[in-house]
Amino acid sequence: MDAANSHDAGAQNAGRRHRVVIIGSGFGGLSAAQALAKSDVDVTLVAKTGHHLFQPLLYQVATGILSVGDIAPSTRLILREHKNITVTLGEVDRIDVAGRMVHAVAGHIDFDLPYDSLIVAAGANQSYFGNDHFERYAPGMKTIDDALELRGRILGSFELAELTEDEDERRRLLTFIVVGAGPTGVEMVGQIGELAHRTLKNSYRRIDPGQARIILIDAAPAVLPPFGERLGRAARARLEQLGVEVHLNAMVTDVDSNGIEVKDSDGTVRRIAAACKIWSAGVQASPLGKMLADQTEAEVDRAGRVLVNKDLSLPGHPEIFVLGDMMSLDNLPGVSPVAIQGGKYVARQIDREVEGQQSPSERPPFKYFDKGSMATVSRYSAVVKIGRVELHGFIAWVMWLLVHLAFLIGFRNRLAALFSWGMHILGDKRSHLSATSRFVYGRRALDRVYGGSIASSLDENAPGS
Ligand SMILES: Cc1cc2nc3c(=O)[nH]c(=O)nc-3n(C[C@H](O)[C@H](O)[C@H](O)COP(=O)(O)OP(=O)(O)OC[C@H]3O[C@@H](n4cnc5c(N)ncnc54)[C@H](O)[C@@H]3O)c2cc1C
């Protein structure tokens, strides 16, 4: 294969190494970078945070089991031994497809990153299905800031319930609603149940945390739909044992500081007064996908995911790959193994092409190997689906524990997580129940600085509003 036929031609003609820019330090971006560590390329990984975030355990940070450091190791430190990789902090706000250039901003500094190959793995954000104003009252859980804010809101609600003299207000403060009965919603609601019934037991003098009303709501007719009917039923039964109310076929139509409005399948509209609301009902891919589609022949679906070719590249642009939660291919789910395997696959294609072993037109299609899915419901209880094998209860929970331990990056992180899990499992202790007012008020303060109305920000009641 000669240089002219390869998308490496630019680098070869200029007498320099092939430049790969990776956007994102999540599962997709990090696995691509690690897989390129021994390749004859220069890699720049740019991400808007300095850490790699293990999102599947965010709910444990929100409920005080794990600390931030346990699930968010520094990307720079993970990659420091790989001399061909440069890690750069920056939020990408422009991609120039024709000029093969990425533009990013970090603080007051902005910069360009030219590329020969571009890997875009910027993930997804929470979706409120066109009701973005819900976010203020019912934050989602995508970032460390979100998890810490939720920790502050959950604990703050118990604290205010202890203080108030008003019975109705106490009931409102002790009502917790999680919207979305997928894995994240189930894990979150299960942990609020454990917190109320076990960890906080006997720690207040005026309220009984066990009296908290904990509600899981979904517009769909089932809990954990991707796990199938049997496991969904088992998860629901376990949640109900924990005292969680499960409201299915219930569409959330409004959210405000006092509570939520729900429309049931028979058309009945009802309000539930609740201080603490958590949203885990949908995702919207990074806007970088639409930015790419606008400059190429690629299309995006309703969730903003880019419809990629079988080799995860964009139509007409073999030099640009989109992976993980940002891509749409063969109905693959938005889960970490899809992103990890995509990252490794893309790195391999780039490596083979730089070595002159194949041209872009010779790439084999990306094949996803589904190793199964799992979600915890509560202490000692999880659901696992591997092909036709369906498990729930204690054995599933042990499998969940081992898999998550194996995938946490770094020996220290594994040890720290193991210690925290041991404390939680054996002694009902949670080591990370601290919350500061910055966790709770941060979002509102940013609203004020960047455009939210000051008047409306000031009059909302704080934790859980
Ligand atoms: C709460 C929660 C629980 C989950 N539980 C599970 C689970 O149990 N099992 C499972 O398999 N999957 C789970 N997932 C899904 C899984 O985390 C995702 O599928 C996976 O993270 C996708 O990887 P990614 O690389 O595409 O994106 P991400 O991991 O989200 O990484 C995106 C990266 O891009 C960066 N970025 C975004 N925009 C920009 C920009 N403009 N400029 C620069 N950088 C940018 C971000 O900072 C981040 O580093 C869960 C997700 C969440 C939110």
Image (tube, rainbow, N blue to C red):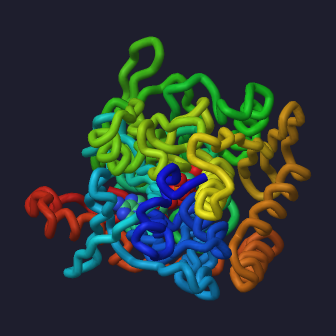
Say which of 226 and 44 sits in front. Answer: 44
Residue furthest out toward the front:
2
Residue at image position (61%, 81%) is: 78
Does 94 sit above or below residue 431? above
- In this rendering, would 240 be left or right of 158? right
Number of disc labels = 0
Asked if residue 428 can be seen in this view, the reply is: yes
Does 189 sit above or below residue 296? below
Residue at image position (73%, 34%) is: 227
Asked if residue 157 can be seen in this view, the reply is: no
Residue 234 rendering spot, x and y as whole percentages: 78, 35
Say which of 141 and 355 sits in front. Answer: 355
- In this rendering, would 205 be left or right of 120? right
Residue at image position (43%, 27%) is: 251
Residue 41 rendering spot, x and y as whole percentages: 55, 72
Say which of 267 and 7 sits in front. Answer: 7
- In this rendering, would 316 be left or right of 382? left
Does 44 sit above or below residue 458? below
Residue 384 rendering spot, x and y as whole percentages: 81, 44
Residue 336 rendering spot, x and y as whole percentages: 63, 53
Say which of 277 and 306 sits in front. Answer: 306
Does 301 sit above or below residue 318? above
Where does the C terminus fall, quadrant-wise?
bottom left
